[in-house]
């Protein structure tokens, strides 16, 4: 039998047999892939078998796409060429589903390094845009849009001779096309190149903006959405070009934030978030606040669909077991380890750790975006926002309709950080009202009241305890035992925040608090148990040694041990499961990774909450063996939770971790890969904790990790949390092994200082700065060029311990003495006034 591409005869699968096979696909795929011609038949079904229904043809294309992704390098050359030619010949298929599938297939091939190896692709697609046949033009544009999304950097590089120089002007011509679908494709293609400031776009920027303005009142929602998206990105990268038109743009965005299409409204709402970060925000927005604030507030109401998805009418669900999807991999505060900042961004009230019961709600939506925008604008305008808000708030907070009252409570929480000073006079009336809302008959009102009260916890704790703290704590503890799981979750999270603020103020109520938390053990379903462990961990952190009383340990330990013993086999004894699967993968199913993550995080919660008392649990379990296995898992989330647990166990009972360090350290070193941000972050944090326990014995392991850490701290666009943890760990590594780390000082001192200048004073910051001081002692030359950054970092301390302050004093004065008075004067002239004043006041330089 001849093959489709005209090569030699092979053992072939006849097409009539193939189509029904596609309908019962699962187990057949693996054996079909053994036929060299299988992929030819897949493309044939997709592009030529018009007698078949579209879903079957599309499925054939998607199977081929997966094969390309997994095995393209091993496709015979004639097969690869046949597939590419078929794609280009059929991009104008009459079916929009088939066109989209071919577009996905093209971009998948292109992403396998084939853009360079398929030189005719881009010219042919661009040429097809000129076709008078709508299907051909739309199909080519759909494929180009996917290529622009997947390969934007490559398209703006010399490797392909900068095809954007031709493509961008070409796309701009189609902004005026008669078809809304084509107009939308054209804008979406150009939008891919805004954030990277592609040269070809920057050269055509005025034409682009002019064309966007012309489309501002387009009737098609997809076009309006893409126009809004473009303006939001331009605000970030080319605000200079928007400033002359800013008044009109703001008016336009005010309309679009109220668009009848929620997707358009959401894109437009992003504009306010981005504008709030620009220095000109106050100047250009002040006169528009009177219109904007009511629009944002209105956007903060739950939509009808939200309420249905959140099961807003289900009040009592505590007895309903969590479904499988409820128990997703979850990371409580310690699971992606972060540091406290001077300016902490609040948590989204709807982003309770495990999100909502329905995945749809976990998406970014208009309610969340409106709340976030109000929050950041409150931080920009402070009390100036209140005249526009207070009249609305009064009406909302006491409204008879629960949906409106709920949105008012959310508004009050959103402005807490920015408008705190201006809100203080109203809090004596508002806090009791919010505490009352904790017993509202609607669960969604009770849960949002928990969140908003947590945002004012700092003020509550600053008042005499009997006035607000005691009533709030009493009601929150009742809500921890609420009959609704969402309220339980919100109350537990809010209580954890209250614990952090109140600290030892809670000591008189410890017995009462523990009774409630322990009672919740028997009441909670699986998902909320994990938040409960987090609340216990935070309680232990907040009250410190006060928890180490026999009576309290006796309350806590039995239910925790009981919970551990009750865990299903697949939760606790994961190691034998893993071992069976690894030895005989063809005979056993892979263990459910979600259970692994839940088990790891549960153990972390115990280690964090019980501190050294977790030792007895570790001693009689196989945790360390399990941990060794999980740290090498292929799934990043498993490794992320493993490293968090390793750090927690290092702090709680290092005696069990130390014998494993020689095996653990190489694994930690290989996971210092910022491609997986959270894994890298937790591995970095765990290394820092291990340093503090190992001391000078860390020396053999320094070279396994140091180069990677230095590379990460110098990497552009690294997330702030990872930078901070990396800086802490480098400091700690230098503290315990200064001779090994100090020679590299010059390579990391500047980003090290800038990463830690905004961190609150705490133990981690303390140990890291001690490390940097010790390293400067070993290698003073390493800091000379960037000494101003060191000065700035030192000035970020509010109250360093006396011996650390002495270390700073000696380094600053040593540097001043070394360069001489006159040079020091010249050097210190560069300091901003605030830095100059702080250094003079605290260190006399």
Image (tube, rainbow, N blue to C red):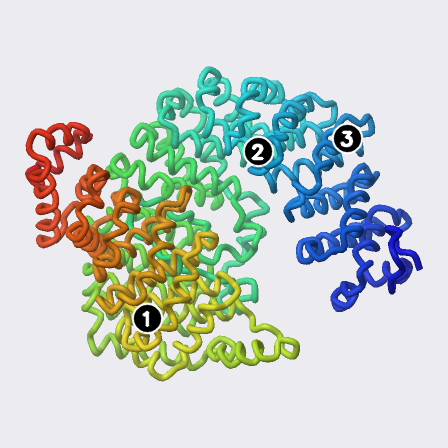
Q: Judge the density around disc 2: few (<14), some (14-19), many (≥20) Cα neighbours within 10 Å.
A: few
Name the residue: 77% across, 65% down.
Answer: 34
**Nearest the eye: 292 or 721:** 721
Residue for badge 1:
649
Q: Are marks 3 and 2 in contact (CB under 8 Å)?
A: no
**Quick one: SS at disc 1?**
helix
- Report the Cα–Cα distance between label 2 and label 1: 50 Å
Residue 463 seen by the camera: no
Residue 443 seen by the camera: yes
Q: Is residue 771 left or right of residue 820?
A: right
Residue 128: numbered disc: 3
**Quick one: SS at disc 3?**
helix
Q: Please report whichever mark, 3 or 2, sits nearer to the chain's N-terminal start.
A: 3
Percent x, y of residue 338? 34, 54
- Report the Cα–Cα distance between label 1 and label 3: 61 Å
Q: Is residue 216 left or right of residue 646?
A: right
**Quick one: SS at disc 2?**
helix
Q: Judge the density around disc 1: few (<14), some (14-19), many (≥20) Cα neighbours within 10 Å.
A: many
Q: Is residue 332 left or right of residue 805?
A: right
Tell me the mark number nearer the camera, choosing from 3 and 2.
2
Percent x, y of residue 485? 47, 62
Q: Judge the density around disc 3: few (<14), some (14-19), many (≥20) Cα neighbours within 10 Å.
A: many
Residue for badge 2:
158
- Report the Cα–Cα distance between label 3 and label 2: 24 Å
Q: Please report whichever mark, 1 or 3, sits nearer to the chain's N-terminal start.
A: 3
Tell me the mark number nearer the camera, choosing from 2 and 1.
2
Name the residue: 66% across, 76% down.
Answer: 586
Q: Please report whichever mark, 2 or 1, sits nearer to the chain's N-terminal start.
A: 2
Rendering quarter of residue 678: bottom left
């Amino acid at each position: 039998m001849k093959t489709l591409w005209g090569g030699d005869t092979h053992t072939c699968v006849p097409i009539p047999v193939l189509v029904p096979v596609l309908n019962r696909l699962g187990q057949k795929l693996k054996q079909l892939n053994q036929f060299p011609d299988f992929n030819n038949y897949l493309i044939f079904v997709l592009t030529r078998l018009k007698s078949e229904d579209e879903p079957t043809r599309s499925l054939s294309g998607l199977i081929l796409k997966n094969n390309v992704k997994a095995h393209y390098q091993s496709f015979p050359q004639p097969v690869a060429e046949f597939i590419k030619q078929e794609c280009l010949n059929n991009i104008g298929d009459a079916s929009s589903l088939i066109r989209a599938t071919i577009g996905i297939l093209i971009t998948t091939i292109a992403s396998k390094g084939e853009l360079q190896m398929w030189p005719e692709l881009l010219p042919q697609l661009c040429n097809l845009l000129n076709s008078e046949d709508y299907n051909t033009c739309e199909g080519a544009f759909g494929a180009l849009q996917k290529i622009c999304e997947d390969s934007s950097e490559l398209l703006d590089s010399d490797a392909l001779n900068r095809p954007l120089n031709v493509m961008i002007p070409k796309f701009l011509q189609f902004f005026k096309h008669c078809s809304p679908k084509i107009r939308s494709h054209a804008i979406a293609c150009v939008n891919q190149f805004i954030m990277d400031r592609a040269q070809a776009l920057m050269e055509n920027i005025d034409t682009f903006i002019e064309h966007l303005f012309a489309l501002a009142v387009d009737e098609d929602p997809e076009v309006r959405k893409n126009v809004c998206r473009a303006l939001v990105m331009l605000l970030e990268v080319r605000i200079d070009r928007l400033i002359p038109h800013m008044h009109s743009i703001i008016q336009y965005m005010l309309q679009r934030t109220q668009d009848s299409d929620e997707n358009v409204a959401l894109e437009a709402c992003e504009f306010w978030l981005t504008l709030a970060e620009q220095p000109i925000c106050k100047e250009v927005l002040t006169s528009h606040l009177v219109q904007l604030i009511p629009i944002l507030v209105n956007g903060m109401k739950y939509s009808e669909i939200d309420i249905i998805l959140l099961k807003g009418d289900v009040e009592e669900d505590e007895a309903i077991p969590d479904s499988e999807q409820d128990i997703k991999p979850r990371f409580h505060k310690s699971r992606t380890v972060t540091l406290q900042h001077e300016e902490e961004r609040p948590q989204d009230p709807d982003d309770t750790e495990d999100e909502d019961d329905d995945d749809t709600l976990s998406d970014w939506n208009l309610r969340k975006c409106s709340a976030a925008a109000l929050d950041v604008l409150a931080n920009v305008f402070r009390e100036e926002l209140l005249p526009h808000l207070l009249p609305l708030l009064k009406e909302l907070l006491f409204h008879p309709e629960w949906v409106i009252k709920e949105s008012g409570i959310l508004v009050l929480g959103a402005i807490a950080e920015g408008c705190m000073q201006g809100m203080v006079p109203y809090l004596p009336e508002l806090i009791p009202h919010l505490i009352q809302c904790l017993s509202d008959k609607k669960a969604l009102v009770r849960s949002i009241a928990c969140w908003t009260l947590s945002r004012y916890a700092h003020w509550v704790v600053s008042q005499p305890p009997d006035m607000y703290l005691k009533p709030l704590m009493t009601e929150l503890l009742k809500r921890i035992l609420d009959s609704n799981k969402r309220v339980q979750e919100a109350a537990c999270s809010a209580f954890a925040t209250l614990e952090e603020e109140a600290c030892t103020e809670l000591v008189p109520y410890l017995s009462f608090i523990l009774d409630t938390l322990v009672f919740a053990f028997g009441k909670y379903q699986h998902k909320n148990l994990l938040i409960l462990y987090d609340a216990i961990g935070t309680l232990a952190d907040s009250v410190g040694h006060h928890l180490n009383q026999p009576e309290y340990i006796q309350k806590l330990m039995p239910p925790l041990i009981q919970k551990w013993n009750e865990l299903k086999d697949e939760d606790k004894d994961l190691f034998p499961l893993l071992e069976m699967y690894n030895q005989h993968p063809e005979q056993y199913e892979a263990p459910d990774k979600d259970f692994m993550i839940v088990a790891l995080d549960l153990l972390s919660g115990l280690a964090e909450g019980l501190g050294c008392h977790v030792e007895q649990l570790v001693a009689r379990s196989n945790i360390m063996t399990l941990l060794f296995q999980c740290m090498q898992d292929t799934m990043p989330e498993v490794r992320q939770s493993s490293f968090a647990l390793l750090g927690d166990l290092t702090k709680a009972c290092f005696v069990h971790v130390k014998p494993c360090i020689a095996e653990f350290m190489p694994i930690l070193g290989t996971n210092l890969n910022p491609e997986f941000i959270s894994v890298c972050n937790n591995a970095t944090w765990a290394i820092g904790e291990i340093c503090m326990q190992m001391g000078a014995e860390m020396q053999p392991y320094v070279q396994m990790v140091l180069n990677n850490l230095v590379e990460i701290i110098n990497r552009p666009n690294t997330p702030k949390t990872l930078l901070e943890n990396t800086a802490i760990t480098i400091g700690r590594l230098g503290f315990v092994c200064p001779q090994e780390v100090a020679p590299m000082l010059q390579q990391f001192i500047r980003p090290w200082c800038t990463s830690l200048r905004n961190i609150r004073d705490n133990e981690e910051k303390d140990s890291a700065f001690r490390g940097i001081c010790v390293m400067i002692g070993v290698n003073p030359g390493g800091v000379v060029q960037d000494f101003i950054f060191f000065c700035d970092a030192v000035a970020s301390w509010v109250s360093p311990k006396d011996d650390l302050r002495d270390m700073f004093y000696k380094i600053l004065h040593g540097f001043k003495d070394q360069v001489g008075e006159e040079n020091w004067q010249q050097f210190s002239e560069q300091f901003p006034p605030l830095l100059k004043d702080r250094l003079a006041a605290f260190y006399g330089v």
